[in-house]
Amino acid sequence: MKSRVVLALIGVSVWFVFVAARLAVLQVRDHEVYAERASDQQLRVVELDPPRGTIYDARGRELAVSVPVDSLYALPDLVTDPAATAAKLAPVLGADRGELEGRLAGDRRWVWLARKLDPPVAEAVRALDLPGLGFVEESKRYYPMRELAAPLLGYVGTDDEGLRGLEYLYDEEVSGRAAERAVIRDNRAGSLLFPDLSFAEPVPGKDLHLTIDATVQHIVESELFSVVEHHRAKGGWAVVLEPSTGAVLAMATYPPYDANRALEHPEGERIRPVSDVYEPGSTFKVVTAAAALEANLVAPSDLFDCERGQIVLYGTRISDHTPFGILTFRDVIARSSNVGAIKVGLRVGAPGLHQMIRAFGFGERTGIDLPGESPGGVRRLDQWEKITPAYVSFGQGIAVTPIQLAAAVAAIADGGRLHRPFVVRSVGSGLADTSTTAPELAGQPISPSTALQLERILEGVFEEGGTASGTAIPGYRLAGKTGTAQKVIDGHYSRTRFVANFIGFAPARQTRIAALVAIDEPQAGLTSGGKVAAPVFSAIARRVLPYLGVAPERPGVASGFAAKLDADWDGGAVAPGVGG
């Protein structure tokens, strides 16, 4: 009996030692391993999108905001009838019934059913009162001005990541840091979401303060869109800059689309004024003129024989839009003679012309803070053929972007100073800016005296005989250059498809705005830059200058001008040819 007791005690002691050792292994050595497994089974952390920073215009008006909305989740182990639940939810959510049923019947303890529901949809789901479903608040991007500057602003995806435009380029600054919430599961009550149990609070993104002025943007868009539709054109672009800084006041593209529905309009994704290239046509004569004036090779009163609108170079005949005889250099530009511009360009020579082109920034990106910018197309000097200077003199054989051309005319308006265009003035939280964009000088392609001479020459475009004479604004001095660029189709210049464009600034002398307007393939009988694009510039200037506080030189000047512009647009067809 004694030996049996001893053996039992030994056995119990061994069992206690074994249990103690096992507990030591589980609770001490492997504690973290099993704690992690338990947490994995019982706890899930869900990330919820934080509010993105607000995008403001130059006067503090909201262009892009984040608003709180409901996202729908399900706890499958609490869904009593997955098939019936899916059947009721599918028409409300606009989702596939089979896919919903698969999620609800799965073995996952927590699933998203729909993210960032519009309020009416969320209310309709609530009204169904289905077991196992719940809502959690997230942030959704909203563009209160809808079409206004939509390509420039861009948009975000369902996961709140910037996909296009400023939303994409500044995503890191604007996106903020996600919130983390807990989903806990026990062995009786199933899975429960605890919105108040937080592992990390959301950190809102930083705000963007733009140079874009919503009022100027609206004016530019309304005038551009009206003319594109009136002339049944394929599209159009417009850019308005502040010449003294390079700040972009407006950037418009046709056709428009609602930024809140951007995913439905893939053709509107790119920012065409910075991404698209085209041959500028006669607007590029300002560069030819700048090169000649800067090198002291011409004076405004110098005479050029325009040979009744025909010149033959290296076996190639080049024509004017109108047959001209003897013209002064000033009138060569004002009346837009190709023959006269060619003779000026040949006087400058290929090296001087190429150098001036590069000095104005053509052939390289401006550095504007927008995604997708193209450098344009300028061939190296050693790749130029003998006839290339002649073609380039009136804007053929070279490809530019609208923003490059707008920056170039702004440089002429600002005494020859070329500024890097920019859209974001500052990045910060509320009124606390963390970084501010300072105006950046990109170069000085021409001297102030050359810029002043060229400015006075470009005023002649709006005077009697100039290609934009019908669009002058009484009381304001305007300066600019028209262009009617033939499009290259299948390797040949088209005789029926054009880009009617215009560059200019106002008022001449103490300039406040510089602009580019381009209308792609206008129809309805008018194709020239002087008849199609120049009226848009004048209409923009007529409305924007008073808004900016620029008074006319004489009182009582603007009455009835809108009707005059309409009459100009409805005028007769111009003579065939290109140049003006």
Image: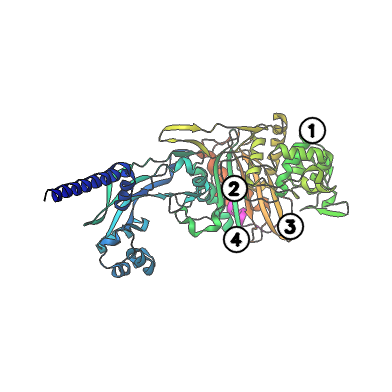
Give the residue drawn at x 60%, y 61%. Answer: 232
Residue count near mark 1 (Cα–Cα under 10 Å), binned few <14, some 14–19, many ≥20: few
The residue that mark 4 highlights is 232
Of the two numbered discs 1 and 4 on the same chain, state the one appearing first in sequence. Answer: 4
Classify 567 as above or below 435. Answer: below
Q: Which residues are magenta?
A: 565-573
List x then y, in percent, for residue 19.
24, 47
Residue contact between numbered discs 3 and 1, judged by CB atoms under 8 Å: no
Residue 492 lies in the magenta-colored region: no
Q: Label 2 to label 1, Cα distance in Å?
A: 35 Å
Residue 295 circle label: 1
Residue contact between numbered discs 4 and 3, judged by CB atoms under 8 Å: no
Of the two numbered discs 4 and 2 on the same chain, state the one appearing first in sequence. Answer: 4
Q: Label 3's element?
A: loop
Q: Label 4's element?
A: loop
Residue count near mark 4 (Cα–Cα under 10 Å), binned few <14, some 14–19, many ≥20: some
Q: Label 4 to label 2, Cα distance in Å?
A: 28 Å
Badge 2 amino acid: Gly
Residue contact between numbered discs 2 and 1, judged by CB atoms under 8 Å: no
Give the residue drawn at x 64%, y 55%. Answer: 520
Q: Label 1 to label 4, Cα distance in Å?
A: 43 Å
Nearer to us of marks 2 and 1 is 2
Q: Label 3 to label 1, Cα distance in Å?
A: 34 Å
The residue that mark 2 highlights is 372
